[in-house]
Image (cartoon, rainbow, N blue to C red):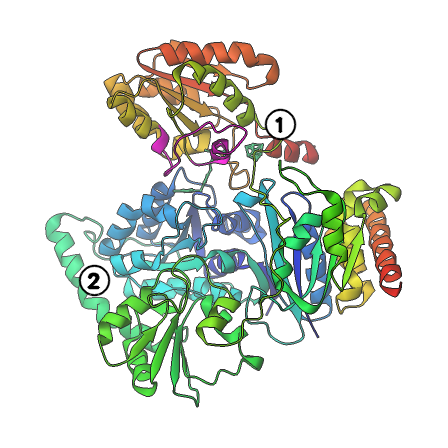
Amino acid sequence: MQNLLLLGAEAIAQGAIDGGISGVYAYPGTPSTEIMEYVQASKKAEERNIHRLWSSNEKTAMETALGMSYAGKRVIVCMKHVGLNVAADAFINSAITGVNGGLLVVSADDPSMHSSQNEQDSRFYGKFAMIPILEPSNQQEAYDMAYHGFELSEKFKTPVLLRITTRISHSRAGVKTLQIKDMLNGSLPENPRQFVLLPAIARINYNKLVAEQELFVEDSENSTFNKYFDGKDKSLGIITGGIAYNYVLENFEDRKIPYPVLKINQYPIPRKLIEKIKNECKELLVVEEGAPFIEEMIKDYFNEGIQVHGKLDGYLPRVGELNPNLVAKSLKLEDTTGEDIPTIVKQRPPSLCPGCGHRDMYDELNEAMKEYGKGKVFADIGCYTLGALPPFNAINSCVDMGASITMAKGAGDAGLIPAVAVIGDSTFTHSGMTGLLDAVNEKSHITVIISDNSTTAMTGGQHSQGTGKIEAICEGIGVEKEHIRVMIPLKKNFEENVKIIKEELAYNGVSVVIPRRECVQTLARKMKKV
Amino acid sequence: MKTDLILAGVGGQGILSIAAIIGMAALENKLFLKQAEVHGMSQRGGDVQSNLRISSKEIASDLITMGKADLILSVEPMESLRYLPYLSKDGYLVTNTKAFNNITDYPEQDELIAKIKSLPHHVAIDANKIASDIGSPRSMNIVMLGAASPFIDMPFESFENGIRKIFAKKGEDIIDVNLKALKAGREFAEREVLK
Ligand SMILES: Cc1ncc(C[n+]2csc(CCOP(=O)(O)OP(=O)(O)O)c2C)c(N)n1
Ligand code: SF4
């Protein structure tokens, strides 16, 4: 059929459209954002009226998707790995309710933390929720897994986790597509109490989920996504999967690996295949992207007898992403790395764009904070986090989305006054609003700066849910009207803006300052279109 | 055939358009292709790269093995050197000489150029100037693609066709000026290498 050149993320989107979804729900986050963006640009999605608008955060996305599944439609929900922390309550419980229409949860991990604050491995979440996990090795498999994932989900009436990593998400290759499927008509769950997790019902559902584990394992053992390749040289057996499989392949001329290889792309772990490779080989090497997830399990599983090499014994690094050279070393092959990077090459960290409104905001805040000294500014996640770097050196924290307001409140409770929060508009509606309510209820002495560029800039300028509503939200939460101050962060307003910030810092209660100027990148794009 | 190339530059300099054109050319020649690119944080003025692999055989890894790249194509001189560990012994480094200086400790231009010129196989070209000379400063990246094209084993017409496809929506004038930029880069490289 058609051969398209697609990013891994786009292949998932195309696979989901062709697999018959009625909706995609997501909050942006690198490296998952392109899935939703692809569906938004798709003519087919428009024709079919597939739901494709952004959600306020990953939890609302996950729950809305579960609602669509309840109504008997296929649905995909996408997020970056840390987004799954936000969605975790809904995610774990969706395994207990089970699904009606097929439900695929995509979590995009970011080993090496190219654009993230940690490198957690989403496979643990899949295991924690006790549901099947799929992980593609290439773009074609990404497409196929999205396409067929709904069948797997519906067969066992369980959500399915699709785990990808940065390199597969942001790498392009040719993909052959399959016949597009009809969308489901929609139907209520056969059991009207399936989704009612009262303890008595939840116990029944949970027992069912536990009982099904054997079936999930059996499905993995028979899955075409898992492959056992025999090899003549049994001195070593390689267990790999996902993108790491490619790095193993790359190290052998014409893809001819002399050792037996077990490629695991569907979980739970296919036990019989593990037994087989263990019985046939003298030693094992586990090559996996992310945490030593398989390695830990099989090390414990065999306990003794056979040597298992990997990230736990230094054959491969414990942190950061893999690459062909690291895998070569673990296989005792020659390392071909060329000349070192010359010392004249300097680091080039990312920085705020010239003309960005966050720049003016930080200049003004730094000036206003002079009299209070350093160490009192809690920030959040977004472009404005770059205010941590020179020349601003303006912020003292960046932990998880929404944490600026709550950390400022906690520090204020501990006597750090005035405590300041700096948060973006999208982050504020993602998970800053609830923390603001806590502060208002206690009349905490904090100043919240909502640096409003009217977009979700860090991830490429997606719609921001609170655009045009920020003041109303703050007022609704209970911030006093006279302590909601809007300003335009421009050089010419410097003096006036510093004065406003100073006034609010001095106020013994919750104040909100809203520097508002559109992101110069989204503005430039709009101008181009005109 | 097989060409493994690293595209390098600074966020916003347009290396992804170069990648897209090469991708189109590879499709036209029915070659396998894998192209890993960087999205996200570092696109804000940080260093960015893309691993582009073209081959007549199926490609395994999305990332190029260090020491096996046939070509480094950089739109910025300091960035070209950041990927030296990837370059194979016979590989070419083709770079723009015009610095993009957005950091405080940027090295001396002379030192940079001296280092680049000390490499056995290099093409150093002031692509900004050439692009300005033909009246289209924004075509700097296409000049660079032209300069690298002799080292990518595909017919020159395929790159031209790639440009026609990528800029199709922007009209004939834009297509023409970019074809000119491509040719100017190509001619410069051919002169350099023959020298
Ligand atoms: C839980 C979670 N979801 C998503 C992200 C990815 N992410 C980082 S910053 C950001 C957008 C921030 O937008 P905004 O707060 O408006 O700030 P801006 O970048 O526009 O300055 C997103 C979506 C993340 N880091 N954590
Ligand atoms: S993308 Fe927008 S918000 Fe982000 S640094 Fe650039 S101008 Fe500022």
Which of the labelled discs sits on residue A209, or is there none? 2
Q: Position of residue A174 (x, y in %)?
A: 60, 66
Which part of the image, by quadrant, shows the N terminus of chain A?
A: bottom right
Dot 1 crowding, Cα within 10 Å, few <14, some 14–19, many 20+ = few
Which part of the image, by quadrant, shows the C terminus of chain A?
A: top right
Dot 2 crowding, Cα within 10 Å, few <14, some 14–19, many 20+ = many
Nearer the camera: disc 2 or disc 1: 1
User: Is residue A486 shown in magenta?
Assistant: no
Observer-nearest residue: A181 or A27?
Answer: A27
Q: Which residues are magenta?
A: A381-404
State left or right for residue B194 relative to residue A63: right
Name the amino acid, label 2: Leu
Query: In terms of secondary structure, what is the magenta stretch mainly?
Result: loop
Observer-nearest residue: A498 or A164?
Answer: A498
* Label 1 residue near ligand 2, CB within 8 Å: yes
Q: Is residue B110 above or below residue B120?
A: above
State left or right for residue B58 relative to residue A503: right
Q: Position of residue A216 (x, y in %)?
A: 27, 69
Q: Is residue A283 visible?
A: yes
Q: Which residue lies under the disc numbered 1? A: A355
Please report the residue visible at 76 percent of the width from the left and 46 percent of the height from the top. B110
- Chain bearing tag 2 is A
State left or right for residue B9 relative to residue B154: left
Q: Earlier in the sequence, mark 2 or mark 1?
A: 2
Q: Is residue A278 above or below residue A135?
A: below
